[in-house]
Amino acid sequence: MTTKNSLTQSSMPLYPAKTKIQVTIIFFVVLGIYTFSMIWTQDEMVGGFGGALGNMYTVIEKFFPPNFTILPTIWKAMMQTIQMAIIATTIAAILTVPLAVLSAQNITTLKPLYYITRTFLNLLRTIPDLVLAVIFVGLFGVGVFPGILALTVFSLGILAKLISETIESVDMNPLEAMRASGGNVFQVIWYSLVPQIAPQFTSLVLYVFEINIRASVVLGMVGAGGIGLVLNQHLKFYNYPNAMTIIIVIFATVLIIEFISNKIREALL
């Protein structure tokens, strides 16, 4: 009897026929969308992909060889970019703590407060960092300060979302035990919640710092200071060898920071 049941179970399909049909239809619909997008994009391009490949040699010829004699003049701007990312990430990490707690459903029992905080964070994430930079540059002028503000708001939306989801996945037993023993809200958070999320919190802050290094370069293109502003100036004056040197410095800096950040995260997790 057991053998017959096991044979019957082994002969049953892993997925029902209806599920297979649905997955197949979805696959071909997505494939059709991608195919249409590729054809439409190529039609919109002047010369298509063939023309782009043909222009590659011309572009490379303009950018190479890099002019490394400008290295001493761009280090200050590169340091400004790193400082922007550090300051913005630090401020965002501090502001994230209360917002992440308030937007965690298992911690905030007051539903109106939870939904208000969630809505506020969703609004922050809907505004692109480039738009934020344009707004703050218009308000405060060209420089590092609007870049820091734009990166802070941008980082806050990401960090609060990721950390609130981390808080919602913690083990609630230590928190309930602390509440049952008479602990107040701050004691419950500090002694039961913080130890559980501290490694993930540090890892996520480092991850957002890496993002801010890349984003600060782009923000500089619209006047938010740093190495991006210098790169934009050289591109406007067609100093392509100088621009190539700046791109190489940015690339090397990002790789070094990412390597150090990965090593720190490996030590924490």
Image (spheres, rainbow, N blue to C red):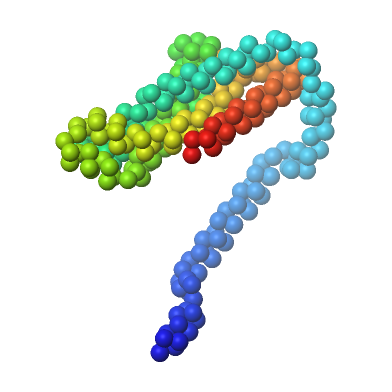
Figure quadrant of residue 124: top left
In the image, 25 versus 170, the foreground residue is: 170
> Which quadrant is the N terminus positioned in?
bottom left
Position of 150 with respect to 109 (left or right) is right
Residue 242 visible to the viewer: yes
Asked if residue 47 is positioned above or below residue 72 in the image, the reply reads below
Position of 41 with respect to 70 (left or right) is left
Residue 119 visible to the viewer: no
Figure quadrant of residue 66: top right
Asked if residue 255 is positioned above or below residue 41 in the image, the reply reads above
- Whole-percent x and y of residue 6? 45, 82
Figure quadrant of residue 152: top left
- Whole-percent x and y of residue 72? 72, 10
Taking the spot 46% from the left edge, 11% from the top edge, the residue there is 140
Taking the spot 57% from the left edge, 14% from the top edge, the residue there is 80
Position of 228 with respect to 142 (left or right) is right
- Whole-percent x and y of residue 82? 57, 19
Counting every numbered tag in the picture gives: 0
Taking the spot 36% from the left edge, 24% from the top edge, the residue there is 95
In the image, 226 versus 168, the foreground residue is: 168
- Whole-percent x and y of residue 268? 49, 35
Taking the spot 58% from the left edge, 18% from the top edge, the residue there is 81
In the image, 81 versus 202, the foreground residue is: 202
Asked if residue 8 is positioned above or below residue 126 in the image, the reply reads below
